[in-house]
Amino acid sequence: MYEIVEKNKLAPEIFHFEVKAPEIAAKAQAGHFLILRAVEKAERIPLTIADYDREQGTIDIVVQEVGYSSQQICDFEEGEAFLDVVAPLGNPIETEDYDRVICVAGGLGAAPLYPKVKSLVDHGAEVTTILGAQRAEKLIWEDRFADLSEDLYIATDDGSRGTEGFVTNVLEELLSEDNDYDAVIAIGPMIMMQAVSDLTAEYDLKTIVSLNTLMVDGTGMCGGCRVTVGEETKFACVDGPAFDGHEVDFEEQRRRKKFYEEHEEEIEEHHVG
Ligand code: FES
């Protein structure tokens, strides 16, 4: 059992959990994810390890209520425990050998982006961060990014905070003024990662995205997380979840996600009432 030592509401429908898991915390690195099963018959949910504390033996996850299964997780309170957590899964992201990096997050993508920024800074990189959200109240961990980043830019769809528009508007402005960066790391909705990758391709700038595909086993067995990268089939769980953004077939991913989101809606309807 994995005890919840702290729970915070970060934004409407977005919760942060700090969970006691010493063995996972001891091995976790930026880019790893976990698969959580809240109770015995619950769906297995993949979540990025958003932070970890080896001394305290804790790991952090951020969950958004978007359907029946995520709501089930978000209903847990401090002192209660999740049934099981399998981790660390996936490959850690390479954060050494960078001098200047732009890190871009859209919405909940801020949570998986955070450990990458932390690791980049730990390895001596100068990080510029762009955080985007639909509106100001949906921005998460702005203070954490402000502490780590050389510069922090905010973009909201409705202009309630920072630049009115998308993260790509800010990124385009930055790159048009100064293109001397080693890489861009972008995490968020598929459409946002695609837009960032299209933009950075014009500047021939290395771009890494992290794919939040459907996952079932997380070990390369089920094929649920398959993704086409550079015309090759890859599995996000064992080959990723980080990939070269210029090589990912985003259209295919968006089609697959849409299909499963419709399926999730059916499950939700089935469980309500
Ligand atoms: Fe099953 Fe990746 S989650 S193969």
Image (cartoon, helix red, strand yellow):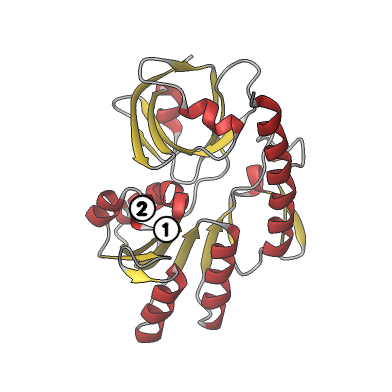
Residue 165 in the image: x percent, y percent?
Answer: 42, 71
Residue of label 2: 139
Residue found at x 63% / y 29%: 44
Q: Which picture quadrant has residue 136?
A: bottom left
Q: Nearer the viewer, residue 215 or 97?
A: 215
Q: Residues within 10 Å of mark 2 (few under 14, many from 20)?
A: many
The amino acid type of the residue labelled 1 equals Ala
Question: For residue 67, which quarter of the picture?
Answer: top right
Q: Residue 60 vs residue 148: left or right? A: right
Tell me residue 20's x, y (percent): 38, 21
Find disc 1 in the rendering and name its residue.
Answer: 133
Give amino acid for label 2.
Leu
State whether residue 114 is above or below residue 71.
Answer: below
The Cα–Cα distance between marks 2 and 1, rounded to whole angstroms, is 6 Å
Residue 141 image position (x, y, % from top left): 32, 48
**Residue 163 found in image quarter:** bottom left
Q: Nearer the viewer, residue 17 or 51?
A: 17
Residue 6 is labelled as: none
Q: Quick one: which residue is furthest to the left in this view? A: 147
Q: Is residue 164 above or below residue 271?
A: below
